[in-house]
Structure formats: structure tokens, C-alpha cells
Image (tube, coloured by chain):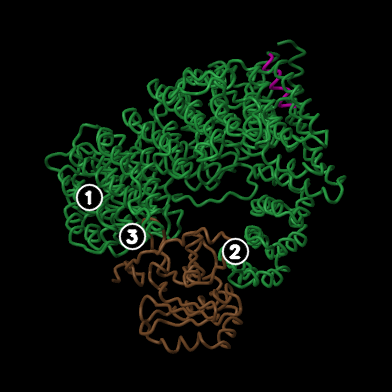
Amino acid sequence: MMAADGALLLSLVEEFVSGLQDSKAKDTAAGVRNGQFTVLQLVEALGLSLTSSQPHTRARGVQLLSEVLHECYGNLTEREVEVLIAFYENRLKDHYVITPSVLQGLRALTKCAALPPGSAVSMLRSLFQDVHVQSLMLMERSCVYNMLINLMETREAELKGLGADFVFGFVQSMDGERDPRNLLLAFQIAKNIVHRGYDLGKFTEELFEVTSCYFPIDFSPPPNDPHGITKEELIETLRAVLTGTPKFAEFLLPLIIEKLDSDVQSAKLDSLQTLTACVSQYEHKDLAEFLEGLWTSLRREVFQTSSERIESAGLAAVTALTSCLSRSVLNSDSEDSLSTFLDLVLKDCKHHLCEPDLKLVWPSAKLLQAACSASSRASHATTAAVMPSLIEQYSSRTQCSHRRTLLEVVLRFIQSVKTSQSSENEESVFSAFRQSLCGMVFSALSETNASLQITATSMLTSLAQQTGLLLDSDVELAVDHLTRLLLTEEDDRVSLAVVDCAGALAELHPTVFITKLIPRLKKEMFSEPMDEGDNRAASGQPSHHAMRQRCLSALAAVSTRPGVVRESTPVLLEVLGSVHAGSAAFSVEEVVSACHSLRRIAEQVQDTEEMGRCFHEVVIPRLISLALQAALQGEGSSGRRSPLVEEVVLSAVVSVISTSCARLQPMLAGQTASRAVSLFLDDDVSFLPDNSFPSQIQLLKKQQGDSWSRSQMVCLLMGCVCSLPRSVEVPQIDQLMSQLEELSCTCSHPLSYNSAAKCFSGLVNKRPQGDSLDSLVQTMMKRVCRELDSSSSPVRTQALTLMIWVSKALLLRYHPLSTALTDKLFSLLDDTDLGAAAADGFSLLMSDSSDVLNRGCHADVRIMYRQRFFSENSAKLVQGFNAAPQEKKSNYLKALSNIVNKLPKQVQITELPALLSLLLEALSCPDQGVQLSTLSCLEPVLVDPPPALIQQLEALVSRLLALTSSPTMSVKIASMRCIHAISRFPEHEILPFRARVLRALARPLDDRKRLVRSEAVQARGEWFLVGSPGGR
Amino acid sequence: MSAGGRLENANPVIFQRSGERLLTASDEDEDVHDRIDDREIFDILFMTSTGSFPVLIGSLPHLIRSINDPEHPLSLEELNVVEQVRVKVNDAESSVGVEFTPTIPHCSMATLIGLSIKVKLLRSLPDRFKIDVQITPGTHASEEAVNKQLADKERVAAALENSSLLEVVNQCLTTRSI
């Protein structure tokens, strides 16, 4: 060391120790780090301070050394560490004012990599011997815990060498700790002791006592807690300690039994969860002597439960307990504790199963099922004990409600076992009861009671999912029952359950469905209603219609396996074919349902090449062919029109096509798209079946007169080309776009020009960025603006439609050109003819559309495009509103409510203060659409009202009360929901309005409509409670 | 049936729920006038149609505390305290009659349940209605006395002036999630 450095060191020490300049510690540490002086030189320089007769001077000296070590412990040599430890250990015996600094220094040393062997033990011995931890301050106690944690990480073997003394020392150190931050550290140490196999020796009970005295944790952090310690954290760490070793079992289990008796809900819950956690480590002998006590408590919690959480925690504990007992290996001399426990459960619960009309049947069943689900042994034992009596009861009881309860209980037993059986080939626990169970199901299916039938269908599904419970003959019988119910059962809930069950069974046993169900449903669907022409026709017709609807949805539900799909899709196509040909009288609604079933099949089948071919080569060509025939036929004759030209049917057909193109086999979808393009551009009909079309079809050309049946076919084109994955290219794209633009700007038929515009925008959305896209949009925009700017143009609506759709396509993908389009849309709000339509356009911009430009169609949709649009444009809207003439203002309000309505609630709340006056204005706007959409924006915001809203309460309440006498029921209902929500505002804010609200709500109590009265009853009831004793 | 120790009735008989009122097309048709019917009064008292709160459930805390069935907590309806058949309404004549059945003949809460029902109806019906709340004949030991109290307008009004009684009634009528 240079002489100058020596002088510097001395002066640093002097300034820190005598000058009390704390910053000098940092400087000293920096000197040590960059090699100006060593730690030992620092000790020498400190010499006088460390030997001073004044404890405070000594403390100051040790503090400097400790702070330097805290910064530089990494660079110390083993020799230096040895010397320092000896020094510090010695200082532990010194005056108490020095202790904090000593501990700080020792903690720094515990982090040294160069800790010499044996030093960890000697440090701890001195610590435990000379320091009484709990008389230290919070920070120093934390220092001790951190030392232990550090040493446990690096010197485990050495600490274990201390034997049980280590545990004893720790127990003494933490005994009485109260600070949650330190407790978290202490629990961490205890957890390490338990989990890493430290020798607890004779201190097992002490370690348990010193930690378990905090159980169950009762801690609520102070408000604005800076330390971020949560109750959950403490619970988790303490639970890890208590449940960490079976050695604690004899202490923990009685404690749990005691705490379960607590009236505090969180204590019960914690106890149950701790029980569930601990038994995973235990063996049956750990549990044996407490089984009865535990069972009594668990039974009480489930029988008399006051909350669902406690009930389910209790049931989980029963399962955990049972599975622990099931795991144990039995010795010949020990008793079988699993069967002891199950006997207890059965004794207390089984007899309640014989009282299906009393309340305890449910908790008893749940307890038994919890035990049953734990292991294969447990499920065999439980089911053997309860099933015979349940089955016997079922046949002896006659009341439907009793039978339903029993059936439900049996069902839950079957379901509880389902989860526990791992291997598929293993014979089901229920094999012995196979016949009776099938008998129960089939008898219940034959009953006329709806809830019994519904339970029976779930049971049928569960039986089918267990190996070997349904024989082939049972499946056939089941299918007969399902078929019968589909054909005759009128109750919607039953048919829904039957359809679900058929779907589940068809997945497992497709053959029977192919050979029996599908042919039968087909036959019945195509049969004409029998009582035609009769005077019963009026009543017969709806049921025949409902039967067909059920069959159609069943056909969809069963079609998950390719074999079934091969049989079901032709039936559905035949519905469309025959209705087109006029050979069967299906209603339009039924035809639409057939399409929905086809779409559902396209959604749910596996995406295999076989299924792709089925849809792209059979279903879609057939659908297009039928639609085309209908379109051409409709033009010729003035007579019968095929239902396939109806808009609802076409939209349903589009949904089948677009679903298939979006998800089944991109290669084949691309082929469908290019066939569709050549059909629409080049009249190429070669891929269509029944090919007897004229040579000139020209679907995209403007037709003479009002012939729209051909032009509306463009919606099918949209289905084919707009939902393809973005990787698939659409051929002849430029020509296609220009014809679509032409059609959408010239055609006068709404479905046609709308579909053309949607198709155009769907393609725009997916076109790659670049000049070609820009010029496409600009050309279109020029044309659109020309039409829009000429007030005499006959196609202004068409131009507006196209513009809105293209804006949406661009807005979704954040394309910079979208602004030009939406600005044009804003400017149209002032337009005399188109203002209202432009305002509605914002709703289209902000909402998801079902058939194009959504994620399902693989459209390019950026997240949060709505927020972005809103934040870029809300100011324009407010300005426009202020500048607009009075009669145009409502268009702005409508546009605003359309936009705000679709924003996520979080954004609404933050934006609301700025817009509040406008929204309040909107509430007094005479347009009911505006009123409704504003009310629906307001309602969610009222749940958690921002301060700005509370300031405007007077205006808000007056306007809402005025709307309760609106002529429209939906406005009345929405306004009263808002008033209802306001009743939960802070009481002092709303109390002044109470009398007024109660008076105003008396009137809707006598409204003509029940739905209005019901809202009034609820809102008024809540307002009565405001400011009334016992109210809130 | 007193198996549960501290409970008056630990394992009560359960009755089936009548389920929610189904929404029909005419309910949403502005031109149809829906008359106030028995079921509507019943729903006012139990609110099964909105699924939000069995209004009177609070009046039987001693019973409800332990109750739980697979789908839903029990309401008074399932305990058969009040049955639909015992609600009679005549919209044209503006009269409502409700008969309720206490679970046990000595139920000490009978007056309170009756008062809660009456107050709920007073708050929920147009004031043209005459509201009559009674105990189902033959189901309670002091049937007549309770009926007389509930029929006496001035006594009901006086009861609601009593803030501690009003407090209990309001608690019975407070929305709570169970």
C-alpha cells in the first residue's frame, strides 16, 4: 500500500467513526474494491476505534467494517474470512449496542464463497449461545434469519453435522416472532429443515409448536402495504412446513380437527386444504388413530356446510384421505385402515341414500362419491356397498322426483369413478351392476317425466364411456330410444339432452347410428305430415316441423366420425335438393336448419383429406349448383320460386361454404376458390353436378331490369374466396376486383350490392401491402367519392356501402389509407340523405361481422383496433357535433354511441369523463336507437362509477327517469336497469334522489308489459333500501 | 328429525322447484297487454325468474345456514314455506291474496315472514292493489293472532315506523348472493 493510500484510509476511518459521516463507508468500500487497500488493512486502521473504551465508538468501527464487507464479500480470501469470523464471533459477546453491526457483518460473511470448513458451525454456535434473537430489533432478527438461509443454501452438510442442535437453535431464535416479513423468512427456514432432511432429533414437537402456533394464519396487510406480504403467501409457506413431514402427523392432525370446529370460515378452509396437502405425504399408520375424529369433522362440514368452497374443500379432503389409505401396503397383522375408514363413511352416509326426498341425500352422496373417486379399491368397496340398495330403491320408488334423485346419485357415482380409472382395458367397477344399470336407464328413458329423461341421457353417455358396460345389443336399444325421443318428444330440454347424448354415443359406436338412426330419421323427415288437410292440420303442423328440426340437429350432432359424415351429409343435401325440386315440402326455416347442420359438421369433423374432399368435391359443388339452378329458374317463370333464392337460405349456404373453406384442407379450399372464380368470371360450370346450365350465365354482370336472382349469387363467391387462409392465392384477382367494384356500385338490389361490397372488402383485407393495393383502393375511392359528391346520383347508397366495408377492411389491418375513408364517412354525417346511414355505418365498422372480415375467416385483424380508432377520432366527433346544425346533431350522437358501445369497458370508463356531456345529451335525443345504445354504454360504467359521473348525477337521474315513461319497452327496461345500478352508488350521493326515484318508479309498476314491471320491481326494491335501517 | 344439534331442522324435506318462467314471444310484443298473474306475484317474492335473489331467504337464517343441494341453495319455495297455489291475484279487481305455510306449527318467525311478504308486495305492486297476507289455515298454532296483525293496516304501518323491526324486514328483503 502506498503511503498516500494509508493516509486516505485513516482519514476515511476517522471521518466515519468520529465524524459520523455515513457516506464514507461507500468510499472505503470502493477503495477496497479497486485494490487501494485490503480488508485486513482496514481492520488495522480501525484498531483504535475497535478497542476504544466507548461502546458507541466500537459500534461505529464495527459498522464501518460490516458495511464494507457487505459490498466486498466476494473478494475475500479464506484466510481473511477466518480472521474476520473469529473477530465477529468474539464481538457477539460485546456490548449490546454493537450487536446489530456484528450481525450485519456476519451476514455478509455467510455469503462468502471462501467460507472455511467448520466456520458455519462455529458461527451458528456462537450466535445461538450469545444472542437472544427475539430481544433484537426487527431488522436484526431478519439479519439472523437471512444468515441461516444463506448457510442452508451453501453449507447444508456442515449444518446437518450440528445435528438436532441446529433445529433447537432455530426454534429458540424464532420463538415469539411476530413480524410477517420475518415470519415468511422463518417459515422458509423451517420448510428447508423439514424438506431437506435435517435431523429433528427430540425437537420435532418443538419445531412443530413454534410454527403451528401461527396456524391458521390470520393476517390482513395494512392498507397501502409497502412490503407486499399477502395472507396467501404466509398460508402457503406455513402449509409447506406443517405438511412437509409425516413426523408432524401426530401433532398436526389433532390441531386440524380442533381448528375445523372454528367459526371463522377462512380457518375452516385453511384447515381443510392443509389436511388435503398433508395426507399426500402420510401413510395409513400416521392417520390411524385420528381417522374417526377427522371423519366426524369432515362429515359435519359437508352436512352442515354454509359455503360451496368449504364443501368442495371438505370433499377434496375426503378424497385425499381415502387415496392415502388406499396407497398403504398392508401387513398381515395390521388392520386394513381403508376399510375401517370406508366403514365409517358408509355407516353415516349410506342410510341417507334411502331418503331421496330429504336434504341429506345430496351431501351423503357427495361424501361417498368423494371416497369412491379416490382409488380403484375404494371405488370397488363403495360401489359394492351402495349400488345394490340404490338399484333396489329405484325400482321400488314410484315418485318421479325420487327416482330422478336416485338416478342422479347413481350417475354421479359412475362419473366419479370415470376419473380414477386409468387403464382402458380394465373392467369397469360397475360390471357387476351392468344389467341393472342398463335397465334403470332404459326404464327412465321410457318415462314421461322430463327431468328423469334428461338424467337418463347423461347416464347413458357415462355408461358408454366406461369399458364394457354397454353391449352391442344395449347400444342398439339405446339408439332405438334416442330415435323414438327425437321423433316424438316435444320438450326442448329433453331433445337437447337427447341430441347431446346421440352425439357422444355416435363418437363411440358409429355403426349403429349409420345403419339405424340416420335411415330412420331420413324416412321420418321426408314423410309428409299425416293429418294434412284434416282440421288437425293446424296443431299437427308445428309438431312435424319441430320433429324435423330435432332430426336435423341430431344429424349434425352425430356426425363426428367420417363414416357417419359420409351418410349424414347426403341426407342434408337431399333436403335442399328436394325442396328445390318441389318434391318435398320443407319450410324455409327447415332448409336453413339443414344448412346450419352442414356448417356444424364442417366445424366439428377432423380436418382430414377425406373430409376435405367430401365438402369441397361433393357438398359445396352441390350447394352452388342448386343455388344456381334456383337463380336461373326464378328468372324464367313467373310461377313457383325455389326457396333457394331466399336471402336467409343463401346466407346459410354461404356459412357452410365459408366454414369449410376456412378450416378444411387449404389445398382443396384453394381449388374451390379458383373454381368459383372461373364460374363467376368465365361461366365455367364444369365442376357442378347436374350440368345442364346455359352457356351464358354472367353472374357478375349487371342484369337487365330488376333481375336480382343472378346477381345475388355473388354472396356465394364471397363464401368461397373470403375465408381462405391468407397463404392461399385467389386467381384472376385484378379482374375479379374490378367486376366486384362495378357490381357493388351499379346494382340496385341490396343483397347483391352488399355482398359484392363485402366480397371486395374481404379480398382487400388480405391483399399484400404495396402499390397494387394502394392504387386499387384509390381508384375505388375516386369512384365512390364521385358518386357521393353528386347529390343526384342514383347509387349514393351503394357507394356509401362499399366505402364503409372497405374502410372496415383497412381499419382492421391498420392500413394508413383507412383514415381517408373514415374521414369521408365523418363528413357524411352532415349529409341530408345519407347522414343517418353514415351514423349506422360506424356500428358496422366497430362490430364483428359474422360472414366476412372476422378471425374465423383468417382476416387480418389487429388487436385493439377499436380503441385506436376511437382515440384517433373522438375529438373529431365532438367538434363535428358542436359545429353541426341542430337537426344533424342526432347523427353525431348516434355515431358516438355506436362507437363507444363497442369499446371495452376499461376504455369506456377512462374516456367517459370527456364524453359525458355528449352522452347525457344523447339520452335526451328523440331517436330510440340512440337512447338504447347510450343506455347500454352507460349501464356497465355505472357498476363502478367514475367521479365525473357522480358530479353529473342530477342530470343523469332526471334523464333516466324521463326515459322510464318512453313508449318503447326496451328503452324503459334499459333505463330502469341504469337506475337500479345507481342504487349501489355511495349512499350520501344518492339519498337526495330517493323520494323522486320511488315516485317515478311507481308508474312502471303498473306497466302493460311484465318485463317492464319486473325491472321496476327490482329497481324500486333496491331504492327502498337506500338509507333505510338494515338496507345496506 | 332433529339430527343436527343446533339446527331446528337439519334434514328437511325438499320440494321441487317450479323452474324459471319461460319468456314467450308475446312477452316481447309491445301490443300485448300482460295481465298481472299469480306467477308474477310469486316471482316478486322469490325472484326465480331473474335468478338473483330469493328475497325472503334471509328470514330463516337458522334453517338456511346448513342448506345446500346439488344445483342451488334452497329457497323458501323448496322448503314449501310458500307455494304457488296459495297466491291468488285478480288484476281487474286489484286484489292480491297470499297464504304462506310456516315450516313448523310453532315457528316463531311467522309474523316476521308475513310482514316481509306484505312489505315486499307493497313496494312492488301498483297502489291500486289491496294486499292480503295470511297463514295457510291450520298450519300454525297462533294463526288467528298473526293474521289479525297482518291485516291491520295501522299495525303494519306502526311496525314499519319501528326502526329495529324495519331493519329486520329490510334484511329479509336485501339482495344477497349465497
Measuring from the top left, give residue A1015's x and y in whole percent.
Answer: 59, 63
Q: Magenta span has A30?
A: yes
Q: Chain of mark 3?
A: A
Viewer-side label of 2, 1: 2
Residue in the foreground of this view, choosing between A81 and A503: A503
Residue at (52% x, 22% y) in the render: A694
Q: Residues within 10 Å of mark 2 (few under 14, many from 20)?
A: few
Q: Kindly check if marks 3 and 2 are in contact, taking CB atoms under 8 A apart as contact.
A: no
Magenta portion: prevailing SS class: helix
Horizontal arrangement in the rendering, residue A457 relative to residue B175 (left or right): left
The mark nearer the N terminus, 3 or 1, is 3
Tell me which amino acid carries mark 2. Asp
| Letter of the chain in brown | B
Distance from label 2 to label 1 (Cα)? 46 Å
Q: Residue at label 3?
A: A303
Tell me which amino acid carries mark 1. Phe
Q: Residue at label 1?
A: A442
Q: In the image, which residues are magenta? A: A24-34
| Letter of the chain in green | A
Horizontal arrangement in the rendering, residue A495 relative to residue A843 (left or right): left
Determine which of the numbered discs, if any, sits on residue B42 in the image.
Answer: none
